[in-house]
Amino acid sequence: MKPATMAAQLPSPYLLIIVWIVAGIISLFGAMAFAELGTMFPETGGQYVYLRYVYGDLTAYLYGWGGLTAINTASIAAIGFVFASYCGYFIPLPHLPVETEQAYVLHIPLVGDIFPLQNFGVKLLAIVAILFLTGVNYLSVRSGNAIQFIATVLKTVVILVLVFGILFSGKGDARNLISNGPGFDLSGWKLLAAFMAATTGAFVSYDGWNVLNMVGGEIKDPKRNITRSLVMGVWVCIIIYVLISLAYMYVLPIGVMGRSSLVASDAINVVFGNVGGAVVAALIVVSTFGAVNANLLTCARVIFAMGETKTFFKGVAKVHQKFKTPGNAVLLQGILSCLFVLSGSFDLLADMYIFVSWFFYGLVILGLFILRKRMPHAERPYKAWGYPVIPLIFLLFTTVYIITTLYNDINNYIQGKTAFINSVFGILLTAIGIPFYFYFKRKYRKEVVLSPDENKV
């Protein structure tokens, strides 16, 4: 979905390729810095642990709360949108009259308007899929893993078909790869803003590079193997995304690509006709179905952990007696994800959760510098490659990304180009966690009282 949006934001094929490369390298820089913290603090919780060591409980809690309200749930909803949108290739999804869609509006001050009934058919199908997979993960962890394995295999097939089927078809035009879209005259600040807007789409695709640090303490010879796995893994992703983008642009001029709603199927249609487009759409449906399942499977564990540490309702930390799953956490994750489906579109959700994610990524990398000063003699089985230059480049790029994204979102809203400020919405959802932090902190303190029989807690 994102390459089409990126083409609309930055209608220049060679600049889009640069975006993919730059975003991949910046992600690699961040992953290497995260790996140092992963081996330094080999504890369950990843970023939550690092933020707590550096900034204290409130910042760490806001990260956990942001994951619950603006990152994990929004990512599940966004992938659900992709699943439902490509299902629309095969089955007619209902649409409500425009008057009805516009009649029900939820206005959020300083953020914009939400139309819950817009794209009603897509949203309804996405919700059905999320609820179904919520039930699967509630009943059995093993079933969720089986779905994920099948989806991963089919995802590989999609990539191979898209890249090799299109690039070697001879049915495209190489001039598409160097021809800018009509009206492309961006310069100065506008060019930077467009470049950074497109970078959001690339960050959505690369997101996940921060996962390795969670098991950094369990890796043998971390100095050698972490660097190897990160460099190889991220570069493989860079190559794949560049090849897929080249394939799209080879058969679809950049202007056409920017207007495409199902870019993968539209591109394959040019080569193999409707049958080929249907095959790819079917594979994407299965792949995204598995991706929704994977996120439900893992993200619910974050809610479970918050309940265990008494920074959230303790009921979400209960393990189902019969199914041995974090049932309450799974149900809450699924319900919240469905509410996010109603809140907007794929781009709104994806842009919001990436913005919030990168805000916390920046705080973690800043924390790397702080811990180097505060704990200079602490054991570090792996040290970030290129310190301090490489982490500093990541931090500077992240700062520019945050500032330009806020500017873009607010400016587009003021000019009437968009009806919603995605980044500000993410900030608002995260900030709502502040009173909850003090509520749970006070609630926990009240439960810790002196025993009447013993002079101890």
Image (tube, rainbow, N blue to C red):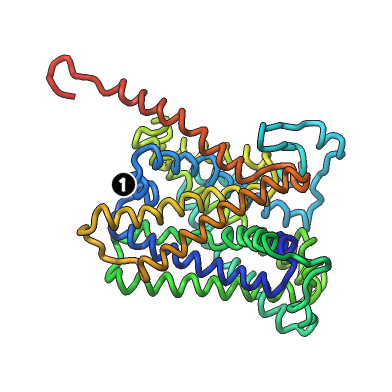
Residue 58 percent coordinates (x, y): 39, 37
Residue 237 percent coordinates (x, y): 54, 71
Residue 1 visible in this rendered orientation of the protein: no
- The kind of residue tagged 1 is Tyr
How many marks are shown on the rendered structure? 1
Q: Quadrant of residue 103?
A: top right
Q: Residue at horizontal 57%, vertical 46%?
A: 133
Residue located beneath label 1 in the image: 53
Residue 238 percent coordinates (x, y): 55, 72
Q: Residue at horizontal 25%, vertical 62%?
A: 380
Return the residue nearer the eye: 87 or 347. Answer: 347
Return the residue nearer the eye: 102 or 189. Answer: 189
Kind of element beneath mark 1 = helix
Image quadrant holding the C terminus, namely: top left
Q: Residue at horizontal 67%, vertical 39%?
A: 343
Q: Is residue 150 above or below residue 438?
A: below
